[in-house]
Image (cartoon, rainbow, N blue to C red):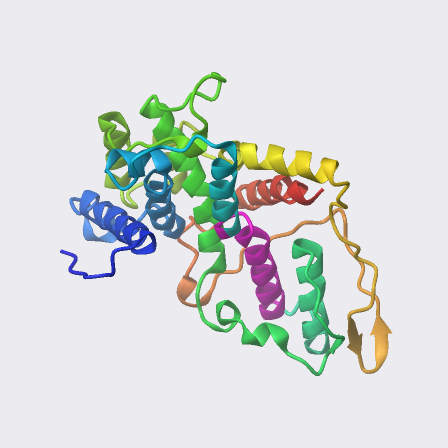
Amino acid sequence: RMVVCPPFNAKQLLRVHSAMARLQYYMQYQQQPKIYRQGANQAFEWGVGSAILLSIDNPNHFHKIGLIKNIDDDYKVGINILMKRALETVVYLPYALTLNNWRSDVFENQTKFENWNCYWWRLRLNNQGIKPPILRSDKDFDSGTISDIVEPKSIIKRFIGIILQFQFHRALCIKAKKYNPKDEKTLPLHMCDISDSKEAGEALKKMMSFGRSQVWRMTLKNLTGSNVLDPTALREYFKPLEDWLRDENLKNDEYIGWEIHETFCKKHKEEIILEQDHKHVHLHLYSDTCDEFKSLDNISKSTEQEINQLLEKLLKWKN
């Protein structure tokens, strides 16, 4: 049972739908033995709750339930919707990569104490194109101001959850026959609404009912037909935005990317020029306190390589 009286607005509408999706997940695996009454892994719950939002936060759905009278097919409206969603999801991916890499390297003593702050800004520049507004030094501790760094929570859970969010959404849209990646005449993936599809509902219900009774890869395959994390669904979802950005950048002759070789952090008054490693994109799968992320079947080397390949594909967006 969920009792809540939020104000009536779009944000709360989405929040309630996400919470209800997670409650359904709990209800579907309740017949499992107690030890298996959990999501397939910690990212699945996040992915399911967020995948539902892709159908709810949709002009077609709002029109269907009477919240808007007319559907505006204006191309710019669609681009604005995608831009908003990209800022909520895609932008988080390199941020999560930076947080996780810095924290795991510190815990594993891969970087010295006196290098902590400069290493932090090197990762932020390499992965996000962000540098400090003023010169920093080893006397500062900028990463310590971020709650995701200092609190014992799994950063990588949401990272993988975002990938699963779009992977689930694509699979459900295909099962609902609302999207066909091979048919250019079909509605784009970001306009798909599965809320009235029994086929999609049954497929999602079956996946959730497994709980943690089997390896998470098997549960993933049951819904999507693949047992690997796949970022192509995310790329398909945002393809109209990616095409628009490419055209706009070419039209305006925008410089894509950022310069790496410059001084922005000092150590003991001696300037250090931090250089980008163009070849190595690594993700340390550090198990947080209480074995927090060992639920991913003690993430195997093959899984680590898989996620690294995923990151390399995603980071190509800045090129």
Q: Main secondary structure of the magenta part?
A: helix
Tell me the residue at 73%/36% (across/down).
Answer: 251
Q: Is 234 placed above or below 293 here?
A: above
Q: Is residue 7 left or right of residue 256?
A: left
The residue nearer to you, when weighing 134 against 296, is 134
**Residue 107 lies in magenta, yes or no?**
yes
Answer whether residue 219 is visible to the viewer in this image.
no
**Can you tell which quarter of the image residue 216 is in?**
top left
Q: Is residue 117 left or right of residue 225?
A: right
**Which quarter of the figure is the C terminus placed in?**
top right
Q: Position of residue 25 (x, y in %)?
A: 25, 46
The residue nearer to you, when weighing 234 against 34, is 234
Q: Position of residue 312 (x, y in %)?
A: 64, 42
Question: Which residue extends farthest left?
Answer: 1
Question: Which residue extends farthest front?
Answer: 69
**Which quarter of the figure is the N terminus placed in?**
bottom left
The residue nearer to you, when weighing 121 against 216, is 121
Q: Which residues are magenta?
A: 88-108
